[in-house]
Amino acid sequence: MAEVTMDKIVSLCKRRGFIFQSSEIYGGLNGAYDYGPLGVQLKNNIRDAWWKEMIQLHDNIVGLDASILMHPRVWEASGHVSNFTDPMVDCKQCKSRFRADQIDLNAPCPVCGNKGTFTAPRNFNLMFATHIGADVDAASTIYLRPETAQGIYVDFKNVVSSSRVKVPFGIAQVGKSFRNEITTKNFIFRSCEFEQMEMQWFCKPGTDEQWFPYWREQRMNFYVNRIGIHPEHLRWHQHGPDELAFYAKDAFDIQFLFPMGWQELEGVHSRTDYDLTQHQKFSGKDMTYLDPETNEKYIPYVVETSAGLTRNVLMALSDAYDEEVVAEGDIRTVLHFHPSIAPVTVAVLPLVKKDGLAEYASKLEHELRDDFATYYDQSGAIGRRYRRQDEIGTPYCVTVDYDTMNDNTVTLRFRDSMEQVRVPVSELVATIKKATKDYKRV
Ligand code: ATP
């Protein structure tokens, strides 16, 4: 296995159209990224896998798509206006800015190397403020949401009264969040605009102690079994007393071994009734739940699973990346994506363009579109075309050759093993579906 560096990932992403720096022709905007043709497909596939896992495969979880702009009181109730801050320091010499909790203030500046040059830490609120309406004053200040979770809490009563959900149940949401991050290095790992996939599980106080380990197990299984991540690249980190929010009962993060080291991917947090209680206090509206069977009235406890979708994209790329020695002096770059998240599932390639092969292959590619994300490529030597697909993580290549014209069989090439088998066209869809179902990460 080759060493996976962030530089290699960034360069592949730009070269092959996964991810670009935002506003690049104007010099770029820090902390903002554009997902190109392959990147948006990869991101959507991960999002869809998560949505299916939550909404389709679990009992009692419903979806929501709350607005990014919310009433400013929401963020007072949640504590974000007063507490959602990072301590910030500047190097007086080179003016570089750092999060005080991420560097050693007694050590030399990591950028210019000068010692003792940091300003005193000052708190900096991470929410982006803007104004609604024509007047730009304090009364018109609103925020771009820094997390999707509050939209779920605020709509808790609407969902209970309009759907047939009963506690315990969950509300799941995917969407954009915004944080004015002080340091945005490490590519899309920490950006100012990003996407989250959050699920809040509402349960009876006391039962949270059973649900918390349940959701931890579910979430780890999701990454290993559905997204196909190497289990040895994932681990748990339990929040110590200094990390735990004052209202939280317990909190674990799933960490992934990113190119820069172990870092948080998702948080699974036991949040008690803190959020709903706060919204009850600030809105004056009743946030209790009436159990229709026992007639008990209570504010449910919440177990939250909170994952970064864009951070998941970086994980998928880092986990999949490899450079393999195929023969002496011949190295292929390959992304070993799980077939269910690969941007392209099947590439169809005519061996040569002439003698009707291109027409046959193009027709076949059209027929496969109903079942798979396909790609047609007829240019260049066949070996080069295979390598192009390896580099974007396409798990299957189908080659149409002269024999195809006689017997309606094609070559099916598997990305990971590079093994090639002959398959009748009539069995192609079933063969690919079976291979995807049986897929084992190398
Ligand atoms: P950190 O301490 O690293 O700033 P956090 O603990 O505040 O992050 P949460 O508020 O728990 O993060 O957010 C849940 C998830 O959302 C994180 O696990 C991460 O995957 C994702 N996330 C949070 N902030 C960002 C960001 N700036 N860019 C990309 N993803 C993010």
Image (cartoon, rainbow, N blue to C red):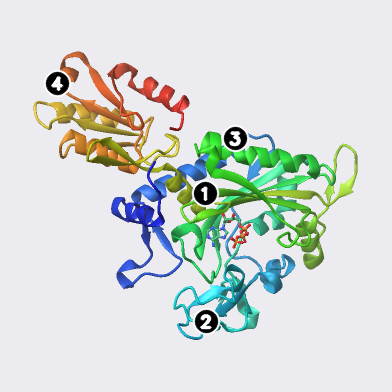
From the viewer's perspective, is residue 129 above or below residue 347? below
* Disc 1 versus disc 3: nearer the observer: 1
The x and y percentages for residue 158 are: 72, 51
The x and y percentages for residue 367 are: 30, 28
Q: Nearer the viewer, residue 261 or 357?
A: 261
Question: Is the C-beta of the residue carrying label 2 under 8 Å from the nearest atom of ligand 1?
Answer: no
Q: Name the residue under label 3.
A: 56
The x and y percentages for residue 354 are: 9, 30
From the viewer's perspective, is residue 439 above or below residue 27? above
Label ID, residue 402: 4
Disc 4 and disc 1: Cα gap in Å?
46 Å
Closer to the N terminus: mark 4 or mark 1? 1
Q: Is residue 26 visible?
A: yes
The residue sitting at 12% across, 32% down in the picture is: 353
Q: Mark 2 points at which residue?
A: 115
Quadrant for ligand 1 reads bottom right
